[in-house]
Image: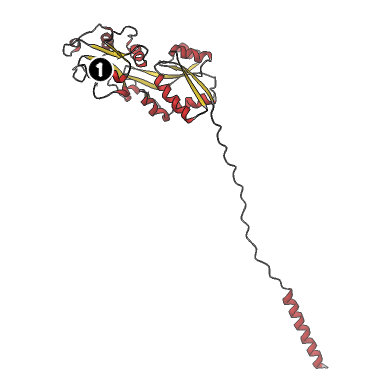
Amino acid sequence: MKKVFAILLTLTMALSLLAACGGKQETPAQTEQPVQTEQPAPAEEPAALSGAVATNGSTSMEKVIGALSEQFMSDNSGVSITYDATGSGAGIEATSNGSADIGLSSRGLKDEEKASGLVGTTVALDGIAVIVNPANKVADLTVEQIAKIFTGEITDWSELGGDAGTISCIGREAGSGTRDGFESITETKDACKMDQELTSTGAVIEAVAGNPNAIGYASLSALKDTVKAVTVGGVECTEDTVLDGSYAIQRPFVFVTKDGVALSAQAQAFFDFATSSAANDLIRAAGAVPVA
């Protein structure tokens, strides 16, 4: 009887052990889930500029405004920039009466124009060199002497310390911005007596280079070593002397806007571009001196 009990006890313990082993379940390994992070929304593309920008004014600024406008329109195909060459006074008035977004003036604003609410921003400076033949002994002239040469009051180089020879005045044609600038600064407008009136700065330089008695004028950026630029009042015509104001035959190229009147998005963008250093090479190529 004891033997039977022992066998039964052994079987019971074995069954219990099997049950315990069978009841133990392996926990499957947890699969790592990637951490979900919020992705920032893609930045919205700025709206493309479109619309018109009306500029009006100085004929002398034609090349500068043309170069700036062409580049800006190339970069912003939806924008159209117009230029009405009416003269500085008309451009200032166009800004005042709202018929132009930006006025163009080749002179600084007068006190009364500023008082009426107009604002002038200098975009560039126009330096005009006075040139002679390299063989000419005359190296320096005053603004007053230059004016007398071009109006015919001084007719021979010997009057200025040079070799005897009749002075030959060579300049640009009527309507030229360079001529307008030169005559405005020397106060010889409509009084110049030219031996030749040529249609390009290059032609003026070539004519002076070929005539020992010639005198002419040219934009600083166009100068070549085939001619000699005289100093004016002892000051050489360079970018630095134009920038610091010590060279006399120069003037500002000004963008005119109205104080308190916001420009359109496209006009403001063009204004910002034209007055930034990004426009410097374009301004130089157009014959002016950048100020940014």
Q: Residue 70 occupies which quadrant of the picture?
A: top left
Q: Residue 66 occupies which quadrant of the picture?
A: top left
Q: Residues within 10 Å of mark 1 (few under 14, many from 20)?
A: many
For this orientation, the residue located farthest to the left is 163
In the displayed structure, 281 sits above or below 184; it is below
Q: Quadrant of the N terminus?
A: bottom right
Which residue shows up at 80% across the image and 87% down it?
Answer: 8
Residue 234 visible, this angle: no
Q: Residue 202 occupies which quadrant of the picture?
A: top left
Report the front residue among 118 and 90.
90
Which residue shows up at 37% across the image and 16% down it?
Answer: 177
Kind of element beneath mark 1: helix
For this orientation, the residue located farthest to the right is 1
Q: Quadrant of the C terminus?
A: top left
* Residue matched to label 1: 207
In the displayed structure, 55 sits above or below 278; it is above
Label tally: 1
Can you give x and y, in whole percent of width and height, for residue 214 in the image? 23, 14
Can you give x and y, in whole percent of width and height, for residue 221 in the image? 32, 24
Can you give x and y, in whole percent of width and height, for residue 38 in the image? 61, 47
Mark 1 residue type: Ala
Can you give x and y, in whole percent of width and height, for residue 168 in the image? 23, 11
Residue 67 visible, this angle: yes
